[in-house]
Image (cartoon, rainbow, N blue to C red):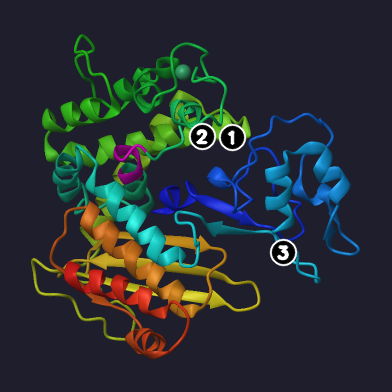
Amino acid sequence: MARGLLECKLGWRVGTGENISIWQDRWVPQLVGNKINTQPIHGSVQTVSQQIDQENRIWKEELISSLFSDEEVEAIKCIPLSKTRCDDCQVWQGEKTGQYIVRNGYKELMSQSDTTEISEDIQMVFKKLWPLSIPAKIKITMWRALRGFLQTGQVLFNRRIRNSAICSRCNLGSESLLHVVADCNNVKEIWDGIGISWDSNLNLETFWHWFIHLVQHKAERIWEKVVIAIWAIWWAHNKQVMEGISTTRQSTIAKILCMVEELKVLNEKLPVIKAVGSDCWRPPQEPWVKLNFDAAYKTQTNKSCSGFIMRDGRGKVMGSGVTHHGNVSDAFMAEAVACFQGLLFAKETGFTTVEVEGDSRTVIEKINQEGFGRADLDSVILDIKSMR
Ligand SMILES: [Zn+2]
């Protein structure tokens, strides 16, 4: 879930250089913005791998000197190339040292989440949305939608990834989230088809305004349908934009109604209290919620996969998230990532009374280890404790 934030400052550590764009990516740590500033002049040289003598694992100095400024050449020559072949990997570049993706990422996330103007309203909405009995993937999509993290044409244009913000499906209007879910290609027919309408004379400028208007004017039992519809329409939009596969309005309508119906049946059948594994997970006392986190770590590749799940006193899932990370230095780091993501999620969604449960033995062992920079992590632990 926090991936979008993490990605915005990810740079590359050069391995083979095959995956790194010379002109687009952040790959030269010593330069401003970690990027090349010289304009591309050589159409055929695109990836960093082309500048490396792969056999001897050294930089092709002559080629580099012909392409870049002196300052850039010096900076590139400072990038170490390992003698054995290794893949490029993504690294956190939020701070100059780049030592600790966890600590840096954490600080960055906290500072960003504190400055969000509408975060209080968003939290208020989340509190109502989260207990709804809808799949976690839909809740996560809603969370991302409300925070402006969904990759609409408008977002991609603002981040200079696309040249135009014009909607690629209808070629009319800017591809904002509101456009995608409420305006594009007569998507309103889908809303009509599921029996949800709104006053189109109202000047609802953003997705947020539109969504708030909708939920404020509809009974809470309709909310599930609204959220499922947003998800389904976004899904169909993505399918079209990413894979060129179009979905008919009829099938989207059928999908939404089917999911609503399925959930209704499921909710009637399921007992409220669910046994969670045989490991006797104990529910927190209301109004507390419990955050469990865990991580898997692969030493050979420095990759980790971390996840968290947040449940209330009845064992109902309030939210969950899974993230893959590269360049994680050890298992502790992976666990810390999982933990801080879960806590950030809890904070964002407005839960202040959170019980945290994880593999504390590993965490404690690792904290006690002496070593470079380890003390930095204490601040994360302190922050984590102060959030409890
Ligand atoms: Zn459109």
Between the C-alphas of marks 1 and 2, the distance is 6 Å
Q: Quadrant of residue 47?
A: top right
Amino acid marked by disc 2: Asn
Question: Vertically, is 203 above or below 344?
Answer: above
The location of residue 348, given as percent across then percent down, is: 24, 52
Question: Vertically, is 116 above or below 152?
Answer: below
Q: State the SS at label 2.
A: helix
Q: Would you say residue 264 sits in the magenta stretch?
A: no
Question: Vertically, is 298 above or below 216?
Answer: below
Q: Name the residue under label 1.
A: 242
Q: Residue furthest right?
A: 55
- In percent of the image, x 69 and y 44: which residue is there? 72
Amino acid marked by disc 1: Met
Q: Nearer the viewer, residue 379 or 135?
A: 379
Q: Residue furthest front?
A: 70
The location of residue 63, given as percent across then percent down, is: 86, 44
Q: In which quarter of the image is the C terminus?
A: bottom left
Q: Mark 3 points at which residue?
A: 80
The answer to whether residue 321 is visible is no
Q: Nearer the viewer, residue 332 or 264?
A: 332
Estimate how packed mark 2 is, as few (under 14), some (14 to 19) or many (20 or more) residues with alpha carbons within 10 Å.
some
Q: Which of marks 1 and 3 is nearer the N terminus?
A: 3
Q: State the SS at label 1.
A: helix
- Give, as a single range, the part of the protein colored magenta: 143-148
Q: Main secondary structure of the magenta part?
A: helix
The location of residue 214, given as percent across then percent down, is: 19, 28
Q: Quadrant of residue 218?
A: top left
Estimate how packed mark 1 is, as few (under 14), some (14 to 19) or many (20 or more) residues with alpha carbons within 10 Å.
few
Between the C-alphas of marks 3 and 2, the distance is 39 Å
Q: Name the residue under label 2.
A: 238
